[in-house]
Amino acid sequence: MVPNKVRATFVMAILACFAPGAEGLRANQTGPVKSRAPCPPQTRIHLPLGRKASGEIIWSPPFRFDAGEPKAIGRHDVGQVKICGPGKFVFSPMTCGNKDYYYEEFKHSRGEVTTECRVVPVPMVKHAGLGCIFVECTS
């Protein structure tokens, strides 16, 4: 027999997970996406691989997100990333299944960016590691 206090705590935890609006309790949530579209080919992420003798960063081949799936990374040496094209770029120290709980995000609208790239610092990831990357594109 399960004590009533334990049962009540369990029931409340389940209700909190599935109650309408429970997702609003996450600290970093920016709101629901109305419609997802495949990311265009110019939307991509590059991660640093090292440095040349001159100090210039050597970037990885592009990570593309045309299938709309996050990509597991598992690195602890990333302090900056190169993001290209339009989209909402998400970098999380968590696994891809838990990426919504703790992340850094950068947004580029289709109107402000087409193919340009920019290098951005990711201080949270530099401290905690990079577990998952994702780009969300909307129509």
Image (cartoon, rainbow, N blue to C red):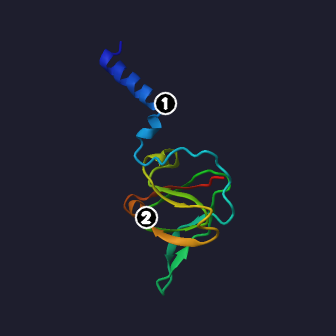
Q: Residues within 10 Å of mark 1 (few under 14, many from 20)?
A: few
Q: Which residue shows up at 44% across the image and 46% down it?
A: 101
- View extreme (bottom): residue: 54
Q: Position of residue 14 (x, y in %)?
A: 44, 26
- Estimate the spatial distance between the alpha carbons at disc 2 and disc 1, rounded to whole Å: 32 Å
Q: Quadrant of the N terminus?
A: top left
Position of residue 36 relative to residue 109, above or below, is above
Which of labels 2 and 1 is toward the front?
Answer: 1
- Residue 49, above or below 92: below
Amino acid carrying mark 2 in the image: Val
Residue at 48 percent across and 87 percent down: it is 54
Q: Nearer the viewer, residue 88 or 4?
A: 88
Q: Against 45, is 103 above or below? A: above
Q: Position of residue 126 (x, y in %)?
A: 40, 64
Q: Quadrant of residue 5?
A: top left
**As drawn, which residue projects farthest toward the front?**
111
The structure residue drawn at horizontal position 52% and vertical position 49%, both measured from the top left corner, is 96
| Residue 42 shown left or right of residue 55 in the figure | right
Query: Is residue 10 toward the left or the right of residue 135 in the image?
Result: left
> Which three-letter amino acid code belongs to the residue tagged 1?
Pro
Q: Earlier in the sequence, mark 2 or mark 1?
A: 1
Q: Residues within 10 Å of mark 2 (few under 14, many from 20)?
A: many
Q: Which residue is mark 1?
A: 20
Regarding mark 1 in the picture, which secondary structure is present there?
A: loop
Question: Which corner quadrant of the image does residue 11 belong to?
Answer: top left
* Residue 134 image position (x, y, % from top left): 56, 55
Pick whichever, 47 or 49, lies toward us: 47
> Which numbered disc covers residue 122?
2
